[in-house]
Image: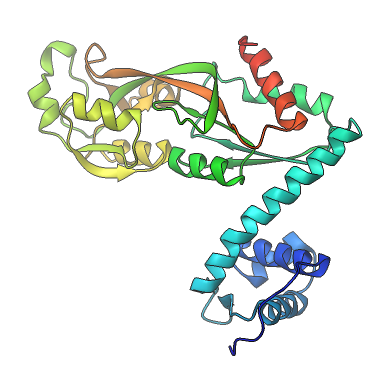
Amino acid sequence: MTRKALLGRVSDVDIRLLRVFRAVVACGGVSAAELELNIGRSTISRHLTDLETRLGVKLCDRGPAGFALTVEGQQIFEASTHLVSALHTFEASVHEVHQRLSGRLAIALFDKMVSNPAAKISETIEEFDRIAPEVIIEIHKDPVNVIESGLLSGRFDLAITPTHRQSGSMDYFPLYSEQMYLYCGHHHPLFGRGDAEVTAVDVGRCKYAGIGFHSLNMIVSHNLHLTRHADVYDEEAMAALILSGRYLGFLPDHYAEPFVQTREMWRLRPDIYHYQSDHAAILRRSPRPSRLVKEFLGCLQRAHGTA
């Protein structure tokens, strides 16, 4: 595409075109975005072309071969994330002036919280919806490193994650804990063995799956001399490796318990191979949280008895 004059002042039209572009990226293509945007493919394609003309760059490849962002398209998408976040912050500020709890709230959660009886996420949402029924809630599930980056960039307003380390750019509000234990699958050589039959040497000889980003799991693995043979980024993937019968790995006890009951998993030496994962609500310190975010945090703290 021939580069023309770059976009000057951002107009309402540009923001609308950027929203279409972001929906296409989120859905993975023009066809998939039809339902989300409630407009036809030809209209979406025309909007993308108009945006490319406005910006003077090609944003994506689209056609029979599939959809893919260009390098410039990825940069525009990331920049648009900051713009949308700023718009949401502005809208929330206007609503605060009028004492209205409305707008959009983006929340990020770590893996497998719903099955933890200590995590009162559903109860929190129930109370919050009674207080602020006009608010549109977005819930994302991502690894901790992605969540932290999303909080700092403004993509997320609030997150609930494990807190193995703390950043000076964020505020932390403790909520609950979960117990992590080491498991193997039904076909693993250590399955069914009692504590007296399993030594650290036995465990050390087995393939081990660990979390692939900096986490408490990584620290505990190092302290227990467990060498990773596979990296995972969520607990569903960890469970899949454990159930293969080829790997050991840590899981929360509440998530693993159904597999233990059906004898698909076995807990190994809980006296040695265990740790506690503390979870907290996390907010970025700057800009200061909106009234909307504070209300949701209050619901969280009341539900968990930490207010």
Which image quarter is the C terminus in? top right
Residue positioned 73% across, 74% down in the render = 44
- Looking at the image, which is closer to me, 28 or 188? 28
Left/right placement of residue 88 relative to residue 217 reads right
Residue 90, picture quadrant: top right
Instruction: Check the image and report above or below for 79 versus 50.
Output: above
The picture places residue 213, in percent across and down from the top left corner, at 34, 41
Left/right placement of residue 30 relative to residue 93 reads left
Residue positioned 61% across, 69% down in the render = 29
Which image quarter is the N terminus in? bottom right
- Most extreme residue toward the left is 201
- Most extreme residue toward the right is 98
Left/right placement of residue 240 relative to residue 86 reads left
Left/right placement of residue 306 relative to residue 98 reads left
Res. 184 in view: no
The picture places residue 3, in percent across and down from the top left corner, at 60, 86
Instruction: Check the image and report above or below for 193 versus 50.
Output: above
The picture places residue 239, in percent across and down from the top left corner, at 36, 36
